[in-house]
Image (cartoon, rainbow, N blue to C red):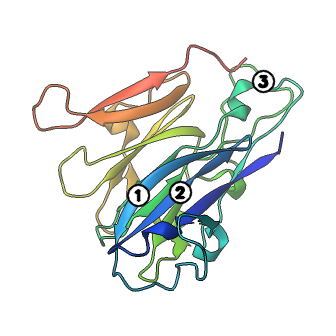
Amino acid sequence: MPTSVGARIWFNTGIGKTDQIQVWAGTVILGFAMLLPAVAQGPSTTSKSQPQNVPAGKFVDITQKLGVNFTRVASHTSRKYLLATMGSGVALFDYDNDGRLDIFFSNSARIDEPMPKDAALRKDSPKYWDRLFHQKTDGTFEDVTEKAGVAGVRYSTGVAVGDYDNDGYEDLFVAGYGASTLYHNNGNGTFTDVTQTAGVAGSGWATSAAWVDYDNDGRLDLVVELSPVGFR
């Protein structure tokens, strides 16, 4: 099993004849591609980031060309912890309301061998940071993780995006092992960790989450899935 897994973006060359550009983004997990579609409005003319001289209907790996340099790091041990085999969460959302989709990836944290019982898994190195990539006007991406304040603290898994306070900006919930994190979008390109104030830190292993207004009161509610499997 590889010690790290890189993100990949494929461009669908069969979309170039329309007034939209479709980008597929996702992570490669144990050799399988998990893809999430996102459609970004754009002119019908060929953009700088669009591959040239490629047969229609084929996909081309343009990850490096677009500047999406993300690698999920897995701490492999002889115990082969299930947590270390899981892939990254990914979200495509327009966090700064500029009309272009941005990309957020969740990442892992350090796992020691042996791992002390009840020890907190922490991102004690930038290689474990969650990453936020801002899409620029030319279709390429820049890493704005530190500026946005979303590097994370614990072992991150799933991601859910939703404007929970109805202020017009998408907020970010990152599920994780030991605790999860809720980031409030400040509307200026930065986020604030409001997990404790909102009361959504939780415990155990949160694998995924979803925002839904289950009671139709106009406010988003949060559903978090917990794994019945512990770390050990």
Q: Nearer the viewer, mark 3 or mark 1?
A: 1
Mark 2 vs 1: CB contact within 8 A: yes
Q: How many marks?
A: 3
Query: Label 3 crowding class (10 Å Cα cut-off): few <14, some 14-19, many 20+?
Result: few
Q: Nearer the viewer, mark 2 or mark 3?
A: 2
Task: Give the amino acid at mark 2.
Answer: Ala
Mark 3 vs 1: CB contact within 8 A: no
Which image quadrant for residue 198? top left
Looking at the image, the residue that sits furthest to the right is: 78
Q: Residue at x 65, y 60 (%)?
A: 70
Most foreground residue, 118 or 11: 11
Task: Give the amino acid at mark 1.
Answer: Ala
The residue identified by callout 1 is 38
Under tag 2, what secondary structure? strand
Cα–Cα span, label 2 and label 1: 8 Å
Mark nearer the N terminus (2 vs 1): 2
* Residue 149 visible, this angle: no
Which image quadrant for residue 29? top right
Mark nearer the N terminus (3 vs 1): 1
Under tag 3, what secondary structure? loop
Q: Is residue 62 above or below residue 107?
A: below
Q: Is residue 43 above or below residue 135?
A: below
Residue 27, given in percent of the width and then of the height, sits at 62, 49
* Residue 4 visible, this angle: yes
Q: Residue at x 86, y 31 (%)?
A: 77
Residue 2, given in percent of the width and then of the height, sits at 83, 45
The residue identified by callout 2 is 25
The residue identified by callout 3 is 116
Q: Is 202 situated left or right of 74 in this image?
A: left
